[in-house]
Image (cartoon, rainbow, N blue to C red):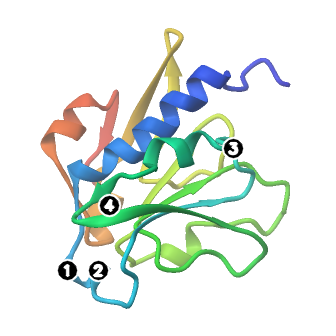
């Protein structure tokens, strides 16, 4: 394991953050107009969480909907996601956020181990898991991130 790889504790913290970001994001009504009855957190690429994320969301609800975790394999990419976490991939054509452009999907990645271009990126600072937010990208996709969450970020891109 490389020296900058997150520890199990850091992964647990990231899994909790991933779920806890949701109440601080406002999705447009169209994000919930399909046949999907759940609030869906998708994981693509290498899954760094294992069972951690499933344990975090078990029995939880978001905007009145049961929270489920979907792991997408292959090239198809996930559909019906509200949050998309993109892990590392060795695939040279890996562009997990290309399919969500213009869609009301909150994209998240680990800055040290995932693809670039996520709206929220996990970073390590002084041995702690923190995050930075690209609020401009979120707004461009119809998402409104609460000022409370923006205030907790170590950096915010508002363009």
**Label 1: how many Cα within 10 Å (few below 14, some 14–19, many 20+):** few
On residue 50, the disc is 3
Question: Looking at the image, is mark 4 or mark 3 earlier in the sequence?
Answer: 3
* Residue on which disc 4 sits: 138
Question: Looking at the image, is mark 3 or mark 1 earlier in the sequence?
Answer: 1
Question: Looking at the image, is mark 2 or mark 3 earlier in the sequence?
Answer: 2
Depth order, front residue of 141/149: 149
Q: CA distance from mark 4 to mark 1?
A: 15 Å
Q: CA distance from mark 2 to mark 3?
A: 27 Å
* Residue on which disc 2 sits: 32
Nearer the observer, disc 3 or disc 1?
Answer: 3
Q: Are marks 3 and 1 in contact (CB under 8 Å)?
A: no
Helix, strand or loop at label 1? It is helix
**Label 3: how many Cα within 10 Å (few below 14, some 14–19, many 20+):** few
**Label 2: how many Cα within 10 Å (few below 14, some 14–19, many 20+):** some
Helix, strand or loop at label 3? It is loop
Q: Are marks 2 and 1 in contact (CB under 8 Å)?
A: yes
Q: CA distance from mark 2 to mark 1?
A: 6 Å
Residue 56, compared with residue 7, is above or below; it is below
Q: Residue furthest front?
A: 59
Q: Is residue 5 visible?
A: yes
- Count all numbered tags in the image, as a single digit: 4
Residue 100: give x, y in percent of width and height. 49, 74
Q: Considering the image in quadrants, where does the N terminus appear?
A: top right
Residue 54, compared with residue 62, is above or below; it is above
On residue 29, the disc is 1
The quadrant holding residue 102 is bottom left
Residue 137: give x, y in percent of width and height. 35, 61
Question: Looking at the image, is mark 4 or mark 1 earlier in the sequence?
Answer: 1
């Amino acid at each position: 394991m490389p020296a900058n790889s997150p520890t199990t504790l850091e992964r647990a913290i990231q899994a909790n953050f991933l779920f806890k970001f949701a109440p601080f994001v406002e999705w447009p009504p169209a994000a919930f107009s399909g046949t999907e009855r759940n609030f869906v957190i998708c994981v693509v690429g290498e899954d760094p969480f294992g069972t951690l994320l499933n344990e975090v969301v078990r029995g939880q609800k978001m905007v009145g909907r049961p929270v489920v975790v979907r792991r997408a394999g292959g090239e198809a990419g996930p559909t019906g996601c509200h949050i998309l976490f993109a892990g590392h991939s060795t695939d040279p054509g890996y562009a997990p956020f290309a399919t969500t452009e213009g869609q009301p999907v909150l994209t998240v990645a680990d800055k040290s181990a995932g693809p670039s271009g996520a709206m929220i990126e996990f970073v390590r600072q002084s041995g702690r898991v923190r995050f930075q937010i690209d609020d401009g990208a979120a707004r461009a996709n119809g998402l409104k991130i609460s000022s409370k969450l923006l205030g907790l970020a170590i950096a915010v891109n508002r363009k």
